[in-house]
């Protein structure tokens, strides 16, 4: 991955520590100019969510010139287990029904159709990445000269690929 070593780069990545080490080794960015923002899933759900706020703050506070959203091929793998644990919990059944009603009938406060859809996020990695990158690129509070990229790590062969 070719990149100006002097440029300040913000990497938005998942929580696994091996990804942070891998990016530091492969990204061709001086570690002093690298900022890593870890989140359970590097997904911006809407332009004014907490992750987007953190990205904007990092851009202005640290003079970030490029944002790289990093995703992996295990993006959806653990979500199914989490959903199963929530849905089999008897104490949550009534709450889930109420929330599903609110999600369906109280738009736009609840942007997704059900609790399950909200927790699961986009069905595919590319949908999620494209939506996130588009929200970041087009955010009215980000300077237009900040470059936004998508990066994909294939965990099977630990290969890094930029998506254009």
Image (tube, rainbow, N blue to C red):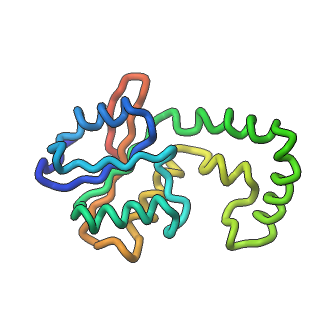
Viewed as shown, does residue 122 lie left or right of 81? left
The N terminus sits in image quarter: top left
79 to 96, vertically: above or below: above
What's the residue at 61%, 50% (across, down)?
A: 121
Whether residue 164 can be seen here: no
Q: How many marks?
A: 0
Q: Residue at x 32, y 47 (%)?
A: 36
Residue 137, located in which quarter of the rendered image? bottom left
Q: Residue at x 75, y 41 (%)?
A: 86
**Residue 13: where, in percent of width, then height?**
40, 44
Give the x, y percent position of residue 51: 46, 58
Q: Residue at x 16, y 55 (%)?
A: 7
**86 or 68, which is in the foreground?**
86
For the residue pair 84 and 89, the one nearer the viewer reads as 89
Residue lying farthest to the front in this orientation: 91
Q: Is residue 77 left or right of residue 81?
A: left
Left or right of residue 116: residue 56 = left
Q: Percent position (x, y) of residue 159? A: 33, 29
Looking at the image, which residue sits at the far top? 157
- The answer, for residue 16, to whether it is visible in the render is yes
Q: Position of residue 142 (x, y in %)?
A: 34, 71
């Amino acid at each position: 991955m070719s990149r100006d070593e002097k440029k300040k780069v913000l990497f938005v990545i998942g929580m696994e520590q091996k990804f942070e080490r891998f990016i530091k080794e492969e990204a061709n960015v001086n570690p002093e100019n690298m900022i890593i923002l870890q989140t359970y899933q590097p997904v911006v759900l809407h332009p004014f969510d907490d992750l987007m706020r953190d990205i904007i703050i990092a851009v202005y506070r640290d003079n970030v010139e490029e944002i790289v959203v990093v995703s992996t091929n295990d993006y959806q793998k653990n979500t199914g287990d989490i959903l199963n644990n929530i849905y089999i919990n008897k104490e949550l059944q009534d709450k889930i029904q109420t929330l599903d009603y609110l999600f369906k009938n109280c738009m736009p406060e609840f942007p997704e159709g059900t609790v399950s859809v909200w927790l699961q996020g986009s069905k595919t990695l590319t949908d999620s990445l494209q939506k996130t990158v588009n929200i970041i690129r087009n955010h009215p509070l980000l300077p237009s000269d900040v470059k936004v990229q998508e990066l994909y790590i294939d965990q099977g062969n630990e290969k890094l690929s930029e998506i254009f």
